[in-house]
Image: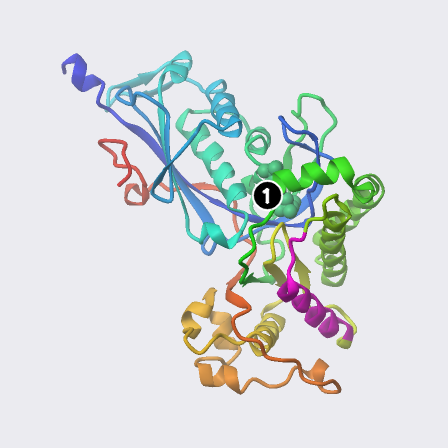
Amino acid sequence: MGDESKKNWVLMVTAQSPTNIAVIKYWGKRDETLILPVNDSISVTLDPEHLCTTTTVAVSPSFNKDLMWLNGKEFSLAGARYQRCLSEIRGRASDFEDEEKGICIKKGDWEKLNVHIASYNNFPTAAGLASSAAGFACLVFALAKLMNVKEDCGTLSAIARQGSGSACRSLYGGFVKWDMGKDLSGNDSVAVQLADEAHWDDLVIIIAVVSSRQKETSSTAGMRDSVETSPLLSYRSKEVVPKRIVQMEEAIKTRDFPTFSKLACTDSNQFHAVCLDTRPPIFYMNDTSHRIISYMEKWNRFEVTPQVAYTFDAGPNAVLIAPNRKVATLLLQKLLFYFPPTPDTELNSYVIGDKSILKDAGIESMKDVDSLPLPSELKDSIPPQRQKGDISYFICTRPGRGPVVLADETQALLHPKTGLPK
Ligand code: DP6
């Protein structure tokens, strides 16, 4: 083999990572560069079958610079957050050898090899569904596998954290806590798994993607303003969250849905109250989000014990959690009653993800949507306007697993010979 052909190898890894939804929110940093939070947070990892990022990372002596493509378009890696993740992983790489392909990479060689990264979200980035969490978790996980990094998942979570805070929680499946840590280095600000996805697999999650024309304040800018101006945020992080974390951990451990629901709803509302307490105030929820809260509160009060939990991140979308399929069926019926699709929308594209819930709810056509019964909690009140078009679509999902390597080469986003996007 001539020298040139020896340089033609491409080594690559493809991984898939989930997104996550916080039920005790992260909002506010004590260190902007290292991304260290002002309080602990807890999240549920969402099933990657419905929401995930797939990333292929590759190295080759033939690549002459680091390059990235996001959803098929070239994307700059110049940002400090990408640079930190890349250098943290490169600094921890170990020797790698594949005799068959004639590849031998020594620990110190990784710094000299350029990477190609291609990333793809299986959900619309514009929908505002925590794409940065899944994205950075996947990037760090895939690079660590490629560069033979021997560190545990906790250390990888601390690296993903430096890409985007919430990304550290996407390194695990199930129920995850991000421990804020105390160290100035950030080494103890890591995610830990509280329980895997099998622990509480009855839970059903329905995401209402709310139609919105508004350009939202980014989480990064929003939380910076909150830290600087909101007195409620410092009270929340010191006095409220530490107690809630203990209670939420216990609720998850014992699968206590009423407590889980009460804590998740209250915490989401307090996070949005902090946003209002910020100067200038930040509005992430809109009228549709507020209507969803009212309907869910009304239902929970009517039934005495909570049927559903709701939580909203830095946008108008609602994440609704039901304790089991039976309640989820009722939830979907109610949601479709309150928010029917516009006449030109196909039911099939209005409810996506795990469509079996739609089937359980006995809804197979638009005619079934039109004849949905009045929710029982409304029996004594004036029926609300059934507004069409306020929701773009619903995603039915469940708690899911953490990142995995996809061994099947057909799922790679880069060409195995050229290392360029397929
Ligand atoms: C409202 O992780 O997106 O979703 O660390 O600046 O990248 P950066 O912010 P990001 O913030 C997420 C905030 C949240 C709550 C949460 O996920 O805990």
Q: How many marks?
A: 1
Residue shown at 73% from the left, 40% from the top:
226
- How busy is the neighbourhood of tag 1: few (under 14 within 10 Å), some, or many (20 plus)? few
* Disc 1 secondary structure class: loop
278 and 359: which one is in front? 278
Q: In which quadrant of the rendered image does the C terminus lie?
A: top left
Side (left or right) of 356 relative to 312: left
Q: Residue 375, relative to residue 408: is it above or below?
A: below
Look at label 1 and name its amino acid. Answer: Ser
Residue shown at 49% from the left, 84% from the top:
368
Residue shown at 75% from the left, 76% from the top:
303
- Magenta-highlighted stretch: main secondary structure? helix
Residue 144 picture location, percent across and down: 46, 28
Looking at the rendering, the stretch of residues picked out in magenta corresponds to 283-301
300 part of magenta stretch:
yes
Mark 1 within 8 Å of ligand 1, using the beta carbon: yes
Q: Quadrant of residue 241?
A: top right
Q: Residue 397, relative to residue 233: is it above or below?
A: below
